[in-house]
């Protein structure tokens, strides 16, 4: 059942938000070890973020863009890697920010794929 959910979320993410380039989990892990590490944005709720998130991710819930615009504007010269649980909220966030000229990438498979592959998570 987990595999079916994972595949469905991956297909939904890619099909609905194909305008944002996708970065694989492996590519992100390699990038985070470089001198030009991307900024990771987790757009899930604070509660979801505290239950587990990608190391180094900033939590900016998808429905709080305007409240966090000063933080986002300070990151405008960086590439932002965006993810949520399955892709829908990240897609909404990406659409709003791409219209404002941000450089974005979408984490392939989002949180579900990251946790499915048992990649490192930070829990508060």
Image (cartoon, rainbow, N blue to C red):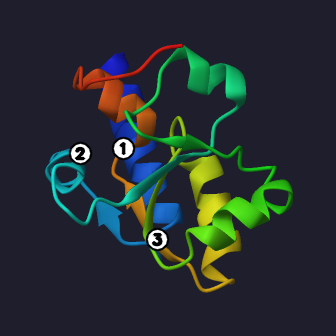
Circle 1 or circle 3, nearest the eye: 3
Quadrant of residue 91 within the rendered picture: bottom right
- Who comes first in sequence, dot 1 or dot 2? 2
Residue at image mark 3? 104
Q: Quadrant of the C terminus?
A: top right
Q: Residue furthest right?
A: 67
Residue at image mark 1? 109
Circle 1 or circle 2, nearest the eye: 2
Label 3, label 2: how many angstroms apart (C-alpha)? 15 Å
Residue at image mark 2? 25
Q: Sort mark 2 into few (<14), some (14-19) or many (20+) by Cα contacts within 10 Å.
A: some
- Who comes first in sequence, dot 3 or dot 2? 2
Circles 1 and 2 in contact, beta carbons < 8 Å:
yes
Helix, strand or loop at label 3? It is strand
Helix, strand or loop at label 2? It is helix
Residue 91 lies left or right of residue 109; in this view the side is right
Helix, strand or loop at label 1? It is loop
x and y percent of residue 32 in the render? 24, 50
Residue 95 seen from this side: no
Q: Is residue 25 above or below residue 116?
A: below
x and y percent of residue 98 in the render? 60, 79
x and y percent of residue 60 in the render? 67, 46
* Nearest to the observer: residue 80 or residue 86: 80
Q: Is residue 60 above or below residue 23?
A: above
What's the mark number on residue 57? none
Q: Is residue 93 above or below residue 6?
A: below
Total labels drawn: 3
């Amino acid at each position: 059942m987990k595999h079916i959910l994972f595949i469905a979320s991956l297909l939904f993410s890619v099909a609905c938000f194909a305008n944002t380039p996708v970065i694989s989990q492996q590519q992100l892990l390699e990038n985070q070890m470089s001198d030009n590490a991307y900024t990771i944005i987790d757009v899930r709720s604070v509660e979801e973020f505290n239950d587990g998130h990608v190391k180094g991710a900033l939590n900016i819930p998808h429905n709080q863009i305007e409240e966090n615009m000063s933080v986002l504007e300070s990151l405008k010269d960086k590439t932002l890697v965006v993810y949520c649980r399955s892709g829908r909220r990240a897609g909404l966030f990406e659409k709003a920010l791409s219209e404002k000229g941000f450089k974005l990438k979408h984490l392939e498979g989002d949180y579900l794929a990251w946790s499915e592959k048992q990649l490192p998570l930070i829990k508060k």
